[in-house]
Each structure stands twice: as C-alpha cells, then as structure tokens.
Image (cartoon, rainbow, N blue to C red):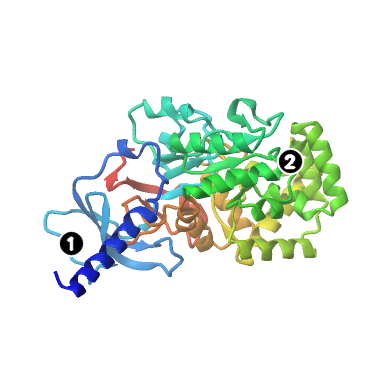
Amino acid sequence: MTTTLRYLTTFLLVILSHVLFSQPSNPVRAVNEASIAVGNTTIAIVGATLIDGTGSDPLPNTTVIVEKGVITAVGSKKDTDVPMGAEVVDAQGLTLLPGLIDAHFHLVSDSMPVQLLQRGITSLRDPGAWMETYEPARQMNLPLPRLYLTGPHLDGFPPAYPRNSYVVQDVTEAKRIVERLVDQQASALKVYFRLPLDLIRQVCETAHEVGIPVTAHLEITDARDAINVGLDGIEHITSFGTTLLPLRKAERYRQTMLKDNNFRRPGRYGVWSRLDTSNQRVNDLAKFLVEKQTFVCPTLGAFEYRLSEEKPDTLRHTGFERMLDVTGYLQQQGVRMVVGSHGHIPYADWGWSYQREMELMVESGISPMEVLVGATLENARFFRIEDKLGSVEVGKQADLLLLDANPLEDIRAMYQINRVMLNGKWITP
C-alpha cells in the first residue's frame, strides 16, 4: 500500500468513526412507532391546493406521490408523473396539509387519541403523564397518532398534580429521573412550577446530553431565569405572568402560590387582568424569547372565558383578553409559537380542542398561515422530528390531511376533514 493510499484510508476511517460514534442518533421516538402500520401501496393525490407547512405560498393543482409510507414526489400536476398502478385520489377542490402535531395534549379518555387521529392530528405530545397511562389506548388495537410522551411532571413538594408527578428533591434525583424516563422512551421532559432553578438546570443538562428537549409550566419562577438555565419551551401563556409583573407584585403572587397550589386558578386571571400589555416588559420579553429561540405553546383554550349570564366574571374575561393580546404580540415579534390543544377545553366540542385553539390564535392576531406553520413544521422542530415530519416534502413520512375547504381563507376550514393519512395509509373513519 502506498503512503498516499495509507493516509487516505486512515483519513476515511477517522471520518467514518466520527460519523458513527461522535454524533448521537436522534433519540426522539414515538413510543408506538413500531406498531404504526406502513402503507404498502403507491398513492397519487392529484389536484389539491397544497399548503406544505413551511410557510411558502400555497400551490394550486398539485400532485403528491406517496410510496411505502414516504413522500417521493411533490409538484404541479402537469409536471409530476403518476406511477403506473398507483391509487389515484382526485383531490380537485380540496386542500392538502401535513398531519397536525399537538404539542400539549392531556389524556381524558382512552379513546380520545383515536378520535384525534380522525380529526387530522397525526402526532401528539403529552407533557405530564406516566408512560403506563397510555397502555389502555394502545391495547385497543385501533390506529393512534404518533405518541410522544414525557413521563410525569417533574415537580417540587407539594406537587400540583400528585398522581402525575415525580417529586424531585435534589440534583442527584433530578439526574436519575431524567435517565430513567429516557430509558422508558421519553421524547421530552416537562418541569413544573415548584421545581427550583438549580434542579431545572440539572434536568436540562442531563436531557440535553442525550438530545432530549425540556419544556415547562411556570407560575412562580421568572421564565427568563428558567430559560437561561436551559429550557427549550414554555407551556401556557400564563407562565409569563410573574415575568411581566413588577418584582414586588410577582413576589406577592409567588408567596401566595407557595402556600396553595390551587390559588393559580383564580389568581392568574387577577394577574393578567391588571397587566399593561403595551408596557416595556412585554417588549423585552419578546426580544428575549426571540434571542433564545424559545418555543411557546400558549394553550389559550385552557383559559378562555366569555362573558354571559352564566359567566359574569369581568376580571376573568379581561384577564383572558390580555392573554390573547400578548400571544398575538409575541408572534408578531418573531417568537416561535406552536399549537397545543390541552386535551379538552371549556369552549370546544369533544375532540375538537385543537381546532378551537387554532381559532383562538387567529383571534389573537396571528395569521392563518402562521398558525398552520406552528401546527406543523414549527411543532416538528419543537419535538426535534423535523427531519421526518411536519411538512409535505420529498423524503418525509407521509402523515397528511385533506380538507374540504381552505384554512387560509377561514381557519374554521380545519373542522372540514376529508381524509387523514398516517404513515402512507388512509385512516378508516
């Protein structure tokens, strides 16, 4: 072997070793990935208006080819050939989207994931339930969305939800519980509002070592402090309440919360009803979130309150209006906003919470296109699965949604489900 060839061989071995061993594989997996059937036919969806999830302008009269669960061609009808023997779906007059991703879902009935899949949600994340919680749903042997689970809330004592929490007492426990949950296929971690900053830091450091994101529900911790120690995402717009208050008022709220977890239910509306949403704190928060590239899942539907004879509380109504204002403003400033349903919410019919959340985000001032990106590709980025899901692009898994109308014209079109595809296979209604 010549000296040059020997050097070249050594160089290639070093590069190969670096690729195989120095770069950890993406650990983010749906817990039910292996049980999701893969379509075994070639399907051509022809004639639809395509909203691909990237934020690009919609493309009319397209052809999308799916083979063995993977998107293999995307283009105009006139320029894209349909393979011989393909199942041709006439989608003229319909709108084609990526499957929806729900960043914040809580299981309230074992059959609910089945219903969500029928309504276009092909992936979901439950940020706060033991892995075993989903066993009954998985044993139904019915098609389910891709289930990305975090395991229980990581909380301090006394936990807000004892049945769905793991109480972390020190940094050693923080490290060990993250490792154990990752071993159970947790694809993210969620810290809850009683966990102090040093333990949030340890959770984030341990999770990030294996490529797992960390998100949080905050009530008594300044969101900026928690993000500075490593958080990737914030759940609920209300998590910014103490961040937007003057320090003295924030501390008063924090001390009351430390006495009683449940004070947050009425207390957060009091906080938000008194916020001046045009003040410098809101602007500074937006700049900070943009700089840190933090994902925000507002879950507006969980806090929605409309005045009526049965619901005359003007303080709650004003508080909710302020939440809408801040959500819209953050998006306008470039904050990474994603969509989460919260499972079941007061002003949505059973199983339609995700669509209601999309309506509320539009009401806050976010454009339908921005909401759709938040529901698809941006959520995939939050999950760290954007290499395989979140947009209609060649090489990605074929999770798709056909609508009878165009949501860019009216977001309520999201209720008009025509067909849903999971992994290249149509879901039977």
Q: Is residue 33 visible?
A: yes
Q: Is residue 266 above or below residue 103?
A: above
Disc 2/disc 1 C-alpha distance (Å): 55 Å
Of badges 2 and 1, the one in the foreground is: 1
Q: Is residue 194 above or below residue 15?
A: above
In the picture, measured across the screen, residue 114 lies left or right of residue 253, that is left
Q: Residue at x 35, y 50 (%)?
A: 399
* Residue 406 pos. (x, y %): 43, 59
Q: What amino acid does circle 2 point to?
A: Ser
Q: Quadrant of the N terminus?
A: bottom left
Q: Is residue 304 visible?
A: no
Q: Which mark is residue 163?
A: none
Q: Residue at x 31, y 41 (%)?
A: 427
Say which element carries label 1: loop
When asked about the image quadrant of residue 292, the answer is bottom right
Q: Residue furthest bottom?
A: 4
Say which element carries label 2: loop
Question: Are dots 2 and 1 in contact, CB under 8 Å?
Answer: no
> Badge 2 is on which residue?
308
* Residue 313 pos. (x, y %): 79, 40
Q: Quadrant of the C terminus?
A: top left
* Residue 35 pos. (x, y %): 31, 35
Q: What amino acid does circle 1 point to?
A: Val
Crowding near the residue tagged with mark 1, few <14, some 14–19, many ≥20 C-alpha atoms within 10 Å: some
> Badge 1 is on which residue?
82
In the picture, measured across the screen, residue 320 lies left or right of residue 248, that is left
* Residue 97 pos. (x, y %): 39, 56
As rendered, which of 28 and 415 lies closer to the eye? 28
In the picture, measured across the screen, residue 274 lies left or right of residue 73, that is right
Crowding near the residue tagged with mark 2, few <14, some 14–19, many ≥20 C-alpha atoms within 10 Å: few
